[in-house]
Amino acid sequence: MRRRILPILATLAGACVVALLVYGVSAQSPNRTLDELVRRGDYPPAPQAARMLPVLGASGKRSLASLRGKVVVLNFWASWCEPCAAEAPLLERTQSTLQRHDGTVLGVTYLDASPDSERFVRRYHLTYPVLRDTTGEFAHSYGTDQLPESFVIDRRGRIVAISRGQVEARFLTRAVALAERS
Amino acid sequence: MRGPAALLACLALVSAAVGASADAAASTAKPRTTLLAVERQVMCVTCKIPLQEAQSPQADLEREYIQDLVDEGDSEAQIKRALVSQYGPSVLALPAAHGFDLAVYLVPAAVVLALLATLALLLPRWRRRGRERPATVAAPPTLSAADEARLESDIARFD
């Protein structure tokens, strides 16, 4: 019996290390549960809506939940991301349209220094509010691993459409219309 | 009238001198670390490699940001805190010692302890076997009287 204990212990230890590695890899890889739910039409509530995030270029914090009752285009971006720069004018135009219908674009910067983000806002004349995800946890809860990414949220705080990558005008028009109807 | 005017002029000169020396002190704050020392401990957040190896516009922006803080006289710890507040904890090359990241520190220690425990368990056993083996090997083969006589005659023949 004593002879068997060592191999058993070694096997158990090896299994523990492998399990740890598997967990680590799966925890790091982006979660696509939201995409699946949206595809099925089971619009999921926007994750971490109550999380308070610092406002870019101002003191104070704000949460996504504070915009409940409005259609929100939640857009993750960073100043170093070229597609983010390419889509910025479209998002600003969308903001002008949404404002008239009691909606808004909400920018969230991620992995970006605030002076660089502020320069980006000035450069592209962005008028919509921008929050800073300083820990990356807010972005991670949306499965965000590449920038830009946009989530269209209806008045009840549910995600009705997701665009991973540079957002297109056609997508925004359809998704905002869907969010206003739902 | 000349007295108060002279006093005011003196005050203005003194305040200007104090202001100038304060500005000079601020602009020549003694650096407490170097860009190189901080670069080794942080990551390029977009390229996901250590900053000291990264060559990209974002890496240059990070370097500029660090250099500004170094010039302001911030310590390594202060600069790292500032970087985390800007880019998040993923900017640090070494993971934080809490949550799942704690495994980075615990697993190697646990592996070393397990190896030491295994050695402590096996070494006495190997030593015991080592001691037992020479005793069995050392026992000389016993020869019969006939074999011994033949061996002796063989040896004599070779002499």
Image (cartoon, coloured by chain):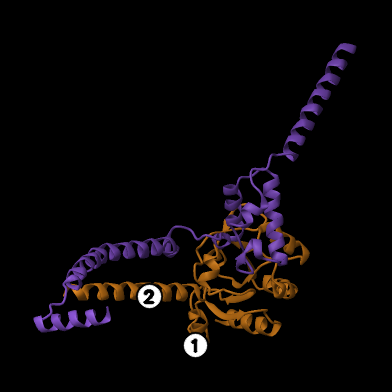
Most extreme residue toward the bottom is A40
> Looking at the rendering, in which quadrant would you find the N terminus of chain A?
bottom left
Instruction: Check residue A40 in the rendering and tell me which mark sits there, or answer none.
Output: 1
Pick whichever, A34 or B125, lies toward us: B125
- State whether residue A116 is above or below residue B137: above
Pick whichever, B126 or A59, lies toward us: B126
- State whether residue A130 is above or below residue A82: above
Q: Which chain is purple?
A: B
> Mark 2 and 1 residues: CB-CB less than 8 Å, in contact?
no
Distance Cα–Cα, label 2 vs label 1: 32 Å
Q: Is residue B20 left or right of residue A14?
A: right
**Residue A78 picture location, percent across and down:** 66, 67
Q: Residue at x 71, y 50 (%)?
A: B68
Residue A9: image quadrant is bottom left
**Three-letter residue code for mark 1:** Arg
Residue B16: image quadrant is top right
